[in-house]
Image: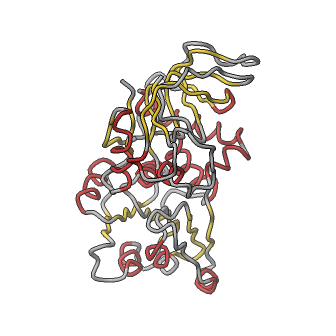
Amino acid sequence: MKALLCKAYGPPETLVLEELPSPTPGPGQVKIRVRACGVNFPDLLIIENKYQEHPDLPFAPGAEVAGDVIEVGPGVTDIAVGDRVIGMLDWGGYQEETLCDAARCLPIPDSMDYDIAASFTLTYGTSYHALVDRARLSAGETLLVLGASGGVGTAAVDIGRCLGAHIIAAGGNDEKLARIAGIYGVDDLINYTTLEEPLKDRVNALSGGKGADVIYDPIGGEAFQQSLRCVNWEGRILFVGFASDGENLPQARTNLLLLKGSALIGVFWGRFTYENPKKNRENMSKLFDMFSAGELSPHISHRLPLAQGADAMYALANREVVGKCVIVME
């Protein structure tokens, strides 16, 4: 099988495409013939040794795959050869075959193609957990989504729309924001790179002077500082990531939280899936039902073969992607 390997920490161009022996599943594992693998921001961090996880070299990045089960290990009774599954990995997705714990596999709905399945769990799982479990977003509330054209951002817009929230989509590119508006029917858009007024003033104006009830922030940086100032009374600020600057993490002035009676809530879906796997499966089942009913509209703007995996990662790093980028196996 072919695998795109990180053999030494560095940028995407240092990845090496090599032939490896087919892996053998151990107890409780299945072997998946990978049909597609989602490309995510943590993939960029893990190959530069900047992520929370530090796998031994060499390894293939890639944390979410979709494909067919071609072998099951000892003790696996609820998954059979031929099943279509999503595999939730820590790494190992950028390869034609991979191993996954059976407990970390989800059945792919009949109506879902492999590329959508490979781009669904991390972004939609994160955003559903954030908006429903952590923020308790309600119909009629105002949801500000920062980084709205990215993977978790588009998922947050999509889910928030389905939950009946008033969406304000913020990003740094007019063309990508226009695409978000066309896909998800969002009327209120903010390009925070060209604003002539502070972000907080525009958000307050679009929310009738109240501010946003829930703020979804995968960006950090100055946008995070502005979010502290445009949250509604008893609002919830969801801190999902720090894509704008992973070296200088933002800090919150607690007096701003006090004055609004607001809450700053950390969201780490990856750990949540391990700490509460039963609840995560319930969440994913609800999301699959929403997709099968035609309520959700995952968007993929880039599909590239494994040999161009570095290009796929750069498309993500250079903010060219709207929604998701997926590696599709040939």
Image location of residue 294, percent across then percent down: 41, 34
Instruction: State the count of labels.
Output: 0
Q: Nearer the viewer, residue 30 or 46?
A: 46
Q: Nearer the viewer, residue 83 or 233?
A: 83
| Front residue of this view, candidates 93 and 193 | 93
The residue lying at 43 percent from left, 43 percent from top is 15
Instruction: Tell me: residue 273, above or below residue 71.
Output: below
Give the quadrant of the C terminus.
Answer: top left
The foreground one among 78 and 327 is 327
Residue at the far left: name it: 175
Q: Decide if residue 208 is on the left or right side of residue 189.
A: right
Quadrant in the rendering for residue 208: bottom left
Give x and y (percent) for residue 266.
62, 63
- Residue 113 rendering spot, x and y as whole percentages: 41, 27
Q: Is residue 120 above or below residue 71?
A: below
Left or right of residue 80: residue 196: left
Q: Position of residue 145 (x, y in %)?
A: 44, 62
Which residue is at a point 58% across and 55% down the rendered structure image?
Answer: 51
Q: Is residue 67 above or below residue 262?
A: above
Q: Residue furthest front?
A: 8
